[in-house]
């Protein structure tokens, strides 16, 4: 429910995606600091944990066998193979949070984002891009977590992912030296979506008219 108390019912699902190195992790984390009531859907992955990452905070790190068990139990809303690793979105947390009226944000890979849209047509898809494509390589190199071959593969995937921009609802440019502007733009999208007319039930509109 929004601060005015007019919007009731399920929360909204925001999906931030884009090529690896676009800055999804940093921007979503900054947005969550600004919006403490925004819930975050942690993806499951078979990828090895990086030194700075925490289990169940950045990702739910699982074995290949555990991931397959989740698939067999239909516990994942969507899943994809990316760069030799498996990624998926646990279903229960999203469904429960939305049903309780909480807005949820998630950041799957591009194919995963499109799969979420197929399952939740009302989901808001946001494509995050750098101001220059060459910045992707610089950001991936700065991580110091992947080999040159792995980075080259990620850049190849990124070029393919850019072709899906028009299947998203919004595009946000994360400028190399102005990340705060991208956070502001993400926040503006969340705010605007909350005030779209079709999200207001008739009873709320009537209440405003008769007040």
Image (cartoon, rainbow, N blue to C red):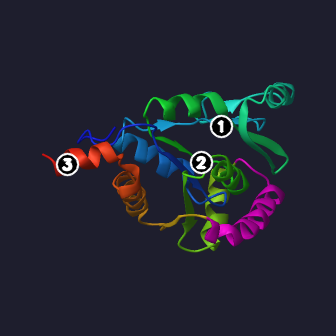
Q: Secondary structure at mark 2?
A: loop
- Say which of 29 and 14 sits in front: 14
**Residue 55 point in image, percent of width and height:** 63, 27
Q: Secondary structure at mark 1?
A: loop
> In terms of secondary structure, what is the magenta stretch mainly?
helix
**Residue 95 point in image, percent of width and height:** 58, 32
Which label was assigned to residue 208?
Answer: 3
**Residue 37 point in image, percent of width and height:** 37, 35
Give the residue number, with chain letter if any, for mark 1.
43
Say which label, 2 or 1, has the lower sequence index: 1
Q: Secondary structure at mark 3?
A: helix
Which residue is drawn at the image coordinates 81% and 25% (left, top)?
A: 66
Q: Is residue 147 magenta?
A: yes
Q: Is residue 57 visible to the viewer in this orientation of the structure?
A: no
Q: Is residue 49 left or right of residue 192?
A: right
Q: Nearer the viewer, mark 3 or mark 2?
A: 3
Which residue is drawn at the image coordinates 71% and 47% (left, top)?
A: 145
Q: Quadrant of residue 129?
A: bottom right
Residue range (magenta): 145-167
Q: Residues within 10 Å of mark 2 (few under 14, many from 20)?
A: many
- The answer to whether mark 2 and mark 1 are in CB contact below 8 A is yes
**Residue 60 point in image, percent of width and height:** 67, 30
Q: Is residue 140 left or right of residue 126?
A: right
Q: Residue furthest left?
A: 211
């Amino acid at each position: 429910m929004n601060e005015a108390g007019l919007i009731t019912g399920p929360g909204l699902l925001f999906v931030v995606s884009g090529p690896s190195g676009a800055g999804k992790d940093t921007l979503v984390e900054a947005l969550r600091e600004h919006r403490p009531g925004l819930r975050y859907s942690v993806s499951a992955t078979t990828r090895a944990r990086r030194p700075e990452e925490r289990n169940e905070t950045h990702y739910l790190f699982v074995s290949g066998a555990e991931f397959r068990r989740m698939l067999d139990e239909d516990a994942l809303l969507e899943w994809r193979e990316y760069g030799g690793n498996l990624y998926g979105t646990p279903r229960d947390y999203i469904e429960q949070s939305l049903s309780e009226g909480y807005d949820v944000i998630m950041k799957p890979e591009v194919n995963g984002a499109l799969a979420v849209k197929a399952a939740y047509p009302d989901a808001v898809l946001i494509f995050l891009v750098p101001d220059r494509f060459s910045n992707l390589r610089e950001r991936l190199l700065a991580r110091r977590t992947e080999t040159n071959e792995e980075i080259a593969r990620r850049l190849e995937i990124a070029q393919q992912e850019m072709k899906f921009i028009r299947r998203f609802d919004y595009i946000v440019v994360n400028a190399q030296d102005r990340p705060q502007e991208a956070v502001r733009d993400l926040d503006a999208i969340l705010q605007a979506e909350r005030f779209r007319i079709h999200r207001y039930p008739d009873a709320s509109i009537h209440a405003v008219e008769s007040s």
